[in-house]
Amino acid sequence: MVMSFERSPDTGAVMTVLTGVNDEITYQDLARRSGLGLRRVKEVLASARRGLLSKDILFGTIRRVGLKRMAPKDTVKASEAGKKKAGRLFKREIRKLDTVKDTQGLSNVEQIQLSTNRTAFHYAQQAMLAKPPAPPRPTVNAPEMPQAANLVRLKK
C-alpha cells in the first residue's frame, strides 16, 4: 500500500473557514460554512488546527461551544497551563523510572538511558517550577540622620 501525505479536502475546507475567522466560531457555524457535517468537522479539526499552526494561526477551544482565535495574551496564558501539564507529566515519568530498583539486571546502555532520562525529566520539571526572578528593588536615597548631639538638644 502506497502512503499518501496529501491533505484531505475536508481538512482544507475547515482550514479555509478558520483562516477567515478573527474571533470566535461555533462548531455548528464551522460545519455550515465548510459544507460538512458536524461529526466530520470534529474528525478533521485537529488536523486543520495543526495545519494552521504552521501558518502561525492558533485556535483555542471554548468547551462544548466552538473555537476562539488566540491573541498573544491568550497564547501566553495557555502556555502557562501547558507548563503545568508538562510538569505533571515529568513528575509521573520520574515516578515510573524510580520503580526500577535492580539496575544490575540492566545492560550498560539501559543503565545510562535510565540515568539520563531521569536526570532530563528532573531538570525539565525543575525548570517548569522555576519562577521568574523578582524585579530589582528601587534604591531610595534616605535623608541624612541628625547627629546624636542634635538629638539630645531636640529632646529638651
Image (cartoon, grey):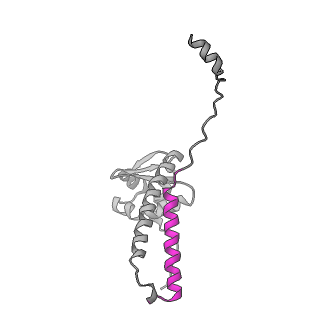
Q: Is residue 12 visible?
A: no
Percent x, y of residue 121: 49, 68
Which quarter of the figure has residue 153? Answer: top right
Q: Residue at x 40, y 57 (%)?
A: 35
Using the image, determine if residue 150 lies above or below residue 52.
above
Q: Main secondary structure of the magenta part?
A: helix
Look at the image and say whether residue 127 sits in the magenta stretch: yes
Look at the image and say whether residue 110 sits in the magenta stretch: yes
Q: Is residue 28 visible?
A: yes
Left or right? Give the position of 41 relative to 54: left
Q: Which residues are magenta?
A: 105-131
Percent x, y of residue 68: 44, 49
Left or right? Give the position of 114 relative to 43: right
Of 118 and 102, nearer the camera is: 102
Q: Residue at x 37, y 53 (%)?
A: 27
Percent x, y of residue 118: 48, 73
Q: Residue at x 65, y 18 (%)?
A: 149
Q: Residue at x 60, y 38 (%)?
A: 137
Of 45 and 126, nearer the camera is: 126
Percent x, y of residue 125: 48, 63
Quarter of the rendering occupied by the C terminus: top right
Using the image, determine if residue 38 lies above or below residue 115.
above
How many numbered marks are there? Answer: 0
